[in-house]
């Protein structure tokens, strides 16, 4: 390894002195103008990881749901999974090293991870449609090549497509062909096979409107159009020709504002969905005849999928170990429905696909979804082999169920949550079950809930435990939340720092939007917090009338108020 060449090249991607960024929930994310050195260094790190694992590693340039001016980067491990936690730490160290220390940190990582410098390295790269992505992905390539790594640049891809490519390349073709055609063919073949069994095939039931968040999803759906010409009519909105990425549209906007995206024409009872900027999340929704908006989020998607899979297993007569994985954001009604009605074990992990994915791998069949629409289903290799064998062997109804299960296994992107693949899975299940969007929505009733983003001086003052459901610091915060929550039926609230944006997220839910305690307008509680940055007061305030338990939340550092 020629460290001198690395240093020389690094000078073209110099780190701004003192800038410290952390590998967060899904890699590095911040304003694109601060990311050049990070991209170069992630190119270097991808080469080391590739040498160490003797596998192809992916580097995706995207900031997914973040605004257009942001960008980001994440590394993809050999099985298409998120980067291993120890390597996330290496990424943070390498990204934080001042220019003169960077070669030393690189060498230290190599020694710690016993990387053989002679080993060949191969890196695949993808990017989303942000204006900054082109230049930033060139910086990744610069990092890869200066360390002698080979690379393939896929150019514009959805994030889940790059995860898929990495998995294909490292599975020796078992998982599929590592090309866009391979991806489209695998998914469309599985979709067509699956929906062949559906009795209702009217156009009305097979059309869906998609808000593409003005992102890469539009481009990739257009590429797939002809594969589905007979099976599904997909109408695209917010396809990037006019609006800004993720601006007033996309899955994150729809989920957090609980209203339709701008730019979507919705007629009553039409099935609509939104992707996010890099098409790794999906949420569904519709307007009823009275004009009310209904959101069908990741929790209801997980319920639809797991109930479909469970029914197929019953039909085949196989009792496999199936579990559902959620996060603290999962609506209480969904957890209760899964556990008490469907009798499926449910587990809660920290936010972040990497946590859910690993938990889901513990089951024969693991379904994981974040409420924000990020998720998929995983099938153990043994289960996949068994189901595909049963699909050949079994006859009649059992054989039909086994064939459906075999097809749906191929329709899921098992590397990571994928809006395109999830949409096809959902459309196929609805068609097979003959369910309308309203019937799906009626499976259970969501508890009213709100999620807010709050800008604070330093989000790191809040730390959490118990899968982020309880705050450890600042002292007094959790007690104050407990005091308020216990006044409401089925109430739950928590606060956690985001790992992708410079904000704190606040979540609350309860059985009703109207307070049970009419007459008392406000409950509030104030406690003092001293931080390294000074002293400020936090006030948790619940307004009993009006919209909901969490009503306003602002902060002014130093003798200000943080209101929940
Ligand atoms: C990423 C992660 C998700 C996570 C989301 C928000 O999504 O992949 O697992 O739920 O960020 O994370 P946080 O609350 O820490 O900001 P995406 O779609 O932006 O890649």
Image (cartoon, helix red, strand yellow):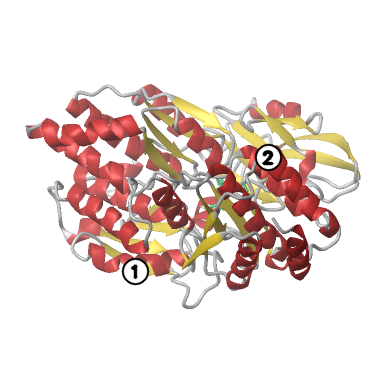
**Which residue is denoted by mark 2 in the rendering?**
496
Q: Is residue 186 visible?
A: yes
User: In the rendering, at what x and y percent does residue 442 appear?
Assistant: 34, 40
Residue 476, which numbered label? none
User: In the rendering, at what x and y percent does residue 234 appear?
Assistant: 30, 64
274 relative to 371, above or below: below
Name the quarter where the N terminus is drawn.
Answer: bottom right
The reply, left or right, for residue 395 in relation to residue 275 is left
44 relative to 476, above or below: below
Q: Residues within 10 Å of mark 2 (few under 14, many from 20)?
A: many
The reply, left or right, for residue 54 in relation to residue 455 is left
Residue at 37% x, 61% y: name it: 179
Beta carbon at label 2 within 8 Å of ligand 1: yes
Q: Is residue 93 visible?
A: no
**Which residue is denoted by mark 1 in the rendering?**
223
Marks 1 and 2, how far apart at CA: 39 Å
Q: Nearer the viewer, mark 1 or mark 2?
A: 1
The single residue placed furthest to the bottom in the displayed view is: 242
Q: Looking at the image, which is closer to me, 142 or 536?
A: 142
The single residue placed furthest to the left in the displayed view is: 396
Q: Residues within 10 Å of mark 1 (few under 14, many from 20)?
A: few
Q: Looking at the image, which is closer to me, 242 or 92?
A: 92
Callout 1: SS: helix
The single residue placed furthest to the front in the displayed view is: 118
User: In the rendering, at what x and y percent does residue 408 appear?
Assistant: 27, 43
- Sequence order check: which comes first, mark 1 or mark 2? 1
Residue at 49% x, 37% y: name it: 357
The reply, left or right, for residue 447 in relation to residue 456 is left
Q: Picture quarter containing residue 376?
A: top left
């Amino acid at each position: 390894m020629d460290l001198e060449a690395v240093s020389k090249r690094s000078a073209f991607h110099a780190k701004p002195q003192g800038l410290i960024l952390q590998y967060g929930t899904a890699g590095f994310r911040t304003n694109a103008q601060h990311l050049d050195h990070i991209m170069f260094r992630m190119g270097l790190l991808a080469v080391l990881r590739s040498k160490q694992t003797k596998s192809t590693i992916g580097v995706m340039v995207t900031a997914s749901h973040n605004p257009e001016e942001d960008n980001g980067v994440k590394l993809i491990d050999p099985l298409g999974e998120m980067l291993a936690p120890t390597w996330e730490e290496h990424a943070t160290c390498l990204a934080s090293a001042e220019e003169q220390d960077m070669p030393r940190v690189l060498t230290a990582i190599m020694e710690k991870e016993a990387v053989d410098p002679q080993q060949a390295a191969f890196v695949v790269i993808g990017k989303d449609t942000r204006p900054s992505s082109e230049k930033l992905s060139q910086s990744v390539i610069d990092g890869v090549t200066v360390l002698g790594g080979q690379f393939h640049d896929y150019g514009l891809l959805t994030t889940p497509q790059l995860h898929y490519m990495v998995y294909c390349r490292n599975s020796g073709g078992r998982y599929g062909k590592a090309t866009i055609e391979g991806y489209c063919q695998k998914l469309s073949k599985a979709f067509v096979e699956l929906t062949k069994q559906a009795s209702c095939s009217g156009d009305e039931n097979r059309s869906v409107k998609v808000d593409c968040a003005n992102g890469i999803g539009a481009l990739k759906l257009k590429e797939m159009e002809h594969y589905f010409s007979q099976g599904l009519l997909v109408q695209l909105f917010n396809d990037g020709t006019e609006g800004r990425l993720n601006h007033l549209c996309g899955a994150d906007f729809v989920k957090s504002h609980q209203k339709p995206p701008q730019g979507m024409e919705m007629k009553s009872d039409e099935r609509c969905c939104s992707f996010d900027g890099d098409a790794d999340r999906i949420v569904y929704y519709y307007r009823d005849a009275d004009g009310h908006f209904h959101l069908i989020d990741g929790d209801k998607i997980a319920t639809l999928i797991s109930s479909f899979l469970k029914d197929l297993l019953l039909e085949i007569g196989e009792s496999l170990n199936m579990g559902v994985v959620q996060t603290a954001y999962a609506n209480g009604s969904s957890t209760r429905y899964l556990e008490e009605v469907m009798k499926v074990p449910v587990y809660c992990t920290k936010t972040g696909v990497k946590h859910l994915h690993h938990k889901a791998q513990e089951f024969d069949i693991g379904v994981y979804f974040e409420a924000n629409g990020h998720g998929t289903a995983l099938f153990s290799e043994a289960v996949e082999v068994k189901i595909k064998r049963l699909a050949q062997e079994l006859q009649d109804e059992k054989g039909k169920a086994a064939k459906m299960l075999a097809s749906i296994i191929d329709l899921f992107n098992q590397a990571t949550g994928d809006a395109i693949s999830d949409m096809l899975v959902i459309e196929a299940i609805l068609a097979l079950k003959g369910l309308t969007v309203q019937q799906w929505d009626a499976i259970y009733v969501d508890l009213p809930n709100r999620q807010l983003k709050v800008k604070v001086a330093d989000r790191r003052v809040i730390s959490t435990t118990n899968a982020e459901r309880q705050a450890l610091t600042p002292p007094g915060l959790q007690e104050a939340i407990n005091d308020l929550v216990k006044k409401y039926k089925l109430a739950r609230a928590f606060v956690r720092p985001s790992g992708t944006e410079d904000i704190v997220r606040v979540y609350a839910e309860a059985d009703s939007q109207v307070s049970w305690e009419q007459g008392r307008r406000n409950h509030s509680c104030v406690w003092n917090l001293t931080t390294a940055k000074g002293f400020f007061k936090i006030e948790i305030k619940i307004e009993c009338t009006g919209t909901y338990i969490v009503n306003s939340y602002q902060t002014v550092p130093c003798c200000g108020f943080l209101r929940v």
